[in-house]
């Protein structure tokens, strides 16, 4: 079975490598092209027009769709943009083509054929016998997602951090298959994934990378660069139902190398299921399931034979040691007599201990009650001291006093008090200064207006003049000619000048207000800072700091005293709880010691019975040894004369594998498009992922 799986997988791998045209064009893109996104897609489409279709047209309409999905991702594989390019192959040279597509912003990239919209995303192309090449955008989950991770000297690192670094680099491309169908496999519904082959290509600069290795791939070195190509089949292991301990089908590609000043150009990954579409699902039905069943049986029989031999060896050892067993039983009987005597003494001592601890535990409640009363008296006095200091805090209890007092001490911290005093003074100064803001603004505006108006007049006079003259139906040249000729009177000139000045004023006014607001803000802030630095304000802040220093010290001392008593109080509770536990334990010990004594008596009687029965035990072991020998001989005879003959007539078990294999091919044939296809069309799709460069 394992060899058959290997043959199937090897055939798939060979087909991908032979069908290299799937990714050659995209891989060439990685070499040096730095054009825009649509330019890259167009170049690929132009190259495709010279190629002949490698598969026969199975569509009912005579039109098939060849779809290429270009996925632009960042250096970690996150999707930035999806561009889909579709080629409608018009084999029957139809006048019009009805095409279903979920794409947006569709553009004819080769030719001038147009379309009209039908219902439900259907476009009717005026093909006039021609093939149609178009592309568009889409926002949709990809059938296979690609994620790229990086490590430097064994530690994960982001691509941005990796740029320019040196060391042992690991780049892993992990592929997750999201496209599957639910299939009936031997009466059970299972996920059968579309069998995408993922081919990742990277070109590495030999001046940057050395000691390059790749999992599941090949390398080509031309002296200056090393082309690395890796392949994986995400989801195929699960679809085939193969234990990865027997054969592991790769689902990632990993590249390791020593890097010097790391940088990496764009990389390309191609996803295609075309290799499985070329396989015939009708020729994968028959298989003989006998070998698998008998193989499992053979393994079980072999393990049973081994086990019976080990049983025989163990019983032989037991029989050899039976003399020591008899001696040990005699020693055990002597020890049991001594144990019985000791258990009796233990039972009496435990009873006395239980009585003494019970008397001591009866005083626990009185001790705890008195200590609690003292603690509450201390807390009451502390409440009075806090009230005298005008501090409003919750009533102190045994449970909350530490939290409340710590909070007060923290609030009286020098830095926090200074900040609070400073903020209070700042709020008062700010409010006082802002009372005069309007007056400050008016003075600032008077100073700003002439400057702003002059700037506006210098920059916008001609534009304002032309706008005024345009409303009068004149150009600047006509106006100047009229003034020179004396046709335009002085009064008319004054009107024009007034209109121009009004226009300039309208432009300058918001700018002047904005400048005045800014200058006013600066002036207000300056006044606030000057007032805050004044001796009067600083003196008030210093007085607030001095006032809290003595109060903080007093409260800290109060908390220290309460903490000291709390240590005694909790210690007393621990002691009394221990006495109660010990009393309860002693009571159980007394009861258990009595039960132990009774049990030891029974044990002693049993050991003496065992001593008397030991000769019969040895005789039984002898008979068990003889039976184990006959079991081992019989299993060997069954394995050699029965199972091996049956295995000689059995073939390989490929029944379950053939069923899964057929389901994989059919699932692959059903997946024809990413962006949508008409029911009467046949199609094929491949995806090309291009990552950003890391520089």
Image: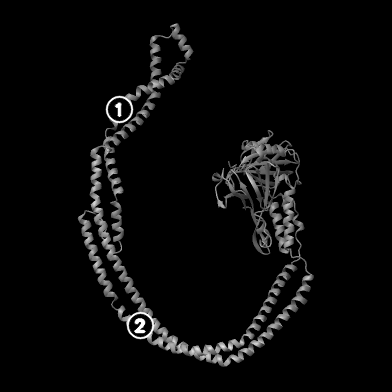
Q: Which mark is residue 166?
A: none
| Residue 493 percent coordinates (x, y) | 40, 12
Asked which secondary structure carries label 2, the reply is helix
- Check the image and report above or below for 346 versus 153: below
Q: Is residue 263 above or below residue 356?
A: above
Contact, CB < 8 Å: mark 2 with mark 1?
A: no
Q: Nearer the viewer, residue 343 or 576?
A: 343
Residue 1 in the image: above or below residue 213: below
Q: Quadrant of residue 453?
A: top left
Callout 1 secondary element: helix
How far separated are the C-alphas under marks 2 and 1? Answer: 95 Å
For the N terminus, the quadrant is: bottom right
Residue lying at the far top in this picture: please name it.
485
Describe the colour scheme in one phrase. Answer: one colour
> Residue at label 2?
354
Does 264 appear above or below 519?
below
Judged from this view, the residue extending furthest toward the bottom is: 612
**How far from the left and from the top, in percent, is residue 631?**
70, 82
Q: Is residue 603 visible?
A: no
| Residue pointed to by mark 1 | 442
């Amino acid at each position: 079975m394992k060899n058959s799986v290997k043959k199937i997988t090897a055939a798939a791998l060979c087909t991908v490598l032979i069908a290299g045209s799937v990714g050659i064009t995209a891989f060439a893109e990685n070499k040096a092209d730095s054009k825009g996104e649509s330019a890259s897609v167009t170049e690929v489409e132009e190259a495709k027009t010279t190629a002949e279709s490698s598969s026969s047209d199975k569509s009912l309409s005579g039109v098939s769709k060849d779809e290429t999905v270009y996925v632009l991702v960042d250096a970690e594989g996150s999707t930035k943009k999806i561009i889909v390019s579709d080629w409608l192959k018009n084999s029957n040279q139809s006048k019009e083509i009805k095409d279903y597509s979920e794409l947006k912003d569709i553009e004819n990239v080769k030719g001038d054929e147009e379309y009209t919209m039908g219902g439900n995303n259907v476009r009717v192309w005026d093909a006039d016998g021609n093939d149609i090449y178009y592309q568009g955008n889409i926002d949709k989950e990809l059938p296979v997602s690609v994620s790229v991770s990086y490590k430097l000297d064994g530690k994960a690192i982001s691509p941005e951090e990796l740029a320019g670094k040196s060391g042992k680099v690991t780049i892993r491309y992990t592929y997750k298959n999201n496209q599957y169908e639910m299939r009936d496999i031997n009466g059970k519904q299972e996920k059968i994934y579309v069998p995408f082959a993922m081919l990742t290509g990277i070109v590495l600069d030999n001046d940057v990378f050395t000691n390059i290795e790749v999992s599941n791939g090949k390398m080509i070195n031309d002296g200056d660069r090393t082309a690395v190509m890796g392949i994986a089949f995400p989801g195929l292991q699960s679809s085939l139902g193969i234990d990865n301990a027997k054969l592991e089908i790769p689902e990632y590609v990993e590249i390791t190398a020593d890097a010097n000043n790391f940088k990496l150009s764009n990389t390309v990954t191609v996803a295609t299921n075309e290799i499985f579409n070329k396989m015939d699902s009708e020729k994968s039905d028959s298989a003989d399931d006998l070998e698998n069943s008998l193989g499992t049986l053979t393994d079980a029989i072999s393990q049973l034979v081994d086990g019976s031999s080990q049983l025989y060896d163990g019983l032989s050892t037991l029989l050899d040691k039976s003399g020591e067993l008899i001696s040990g039983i005699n020693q055990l009987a002597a020890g049991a007599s001594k144990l019985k005597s000791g258990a009796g003494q233990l039972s009496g001592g435990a009873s006395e201990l239980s009585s003494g601890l019970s008397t001591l535990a009866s005083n626990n409640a009185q001790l705890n009650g008195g200590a609690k009363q003292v603690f509450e008296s201390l807390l009451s006095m502390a409440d009075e001291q806090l009230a005298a200091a005008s501090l409003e805090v919750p009533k102190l209890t045994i449970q909350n006093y530490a939290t409340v007092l710590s909070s007060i001490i923290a609030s009286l911290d020098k830095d926090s008090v200074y900040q609070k005093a400073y903020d209070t003074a700042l709020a008062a100064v700010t409010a006082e200064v802002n009372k005069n803001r309007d007056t400050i603004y008016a003075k600032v505006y008077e100073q700003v207006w002439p400057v702003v108006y002059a700037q506006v007049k210098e920059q916008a006079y001609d534009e304002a003049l032309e706008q005024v003259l345009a409303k009068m139906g004149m150009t600047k040249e006509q106006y100047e000619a009229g003034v020179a000729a004396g046709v335009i009177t002085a009064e008319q000139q004054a009107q024009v000048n007034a209109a121009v000045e009004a226009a300039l004023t309208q432009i300058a006014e918001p700018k002047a207000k904005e400048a005045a607001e800014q200058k006013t803000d600066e002036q207000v802030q300056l006044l606030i800072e000057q007032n805050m630095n004044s001796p009067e304000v600083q003196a008030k802040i210093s007085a607030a700091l001095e006032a809290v220093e003595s109060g903080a010290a007093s409260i800290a001392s109060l908390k220290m005293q309460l903490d000291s008593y709390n240590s005694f109080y909790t210690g007393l509770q621990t002691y009394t709880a221990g006495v109660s536990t010990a009393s309860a334990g002693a009571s159980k010990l007394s009861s258990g010691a009595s039960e132990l004594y009774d049990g030891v008596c029974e044990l002693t009687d049993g050991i003496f019975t065992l001593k008397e029965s030991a000769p019969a035990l040895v005789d039984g072991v002898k008979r068990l040894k003889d039976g184990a020998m006959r079991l081992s001989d019989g299993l060997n005879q069954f394995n050699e004369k029965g199972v091996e003959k049956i295995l000689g007539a059995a073939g390989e078990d490929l029944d379950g594998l053939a069923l899964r294999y057929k389901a994989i091919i059919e699932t692959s044939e059903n997946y024809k498009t990413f962006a949508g296809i008409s029911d009467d069309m046949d199609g094929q799709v491949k995806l090309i992922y291009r990552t950003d460069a890391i520089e």
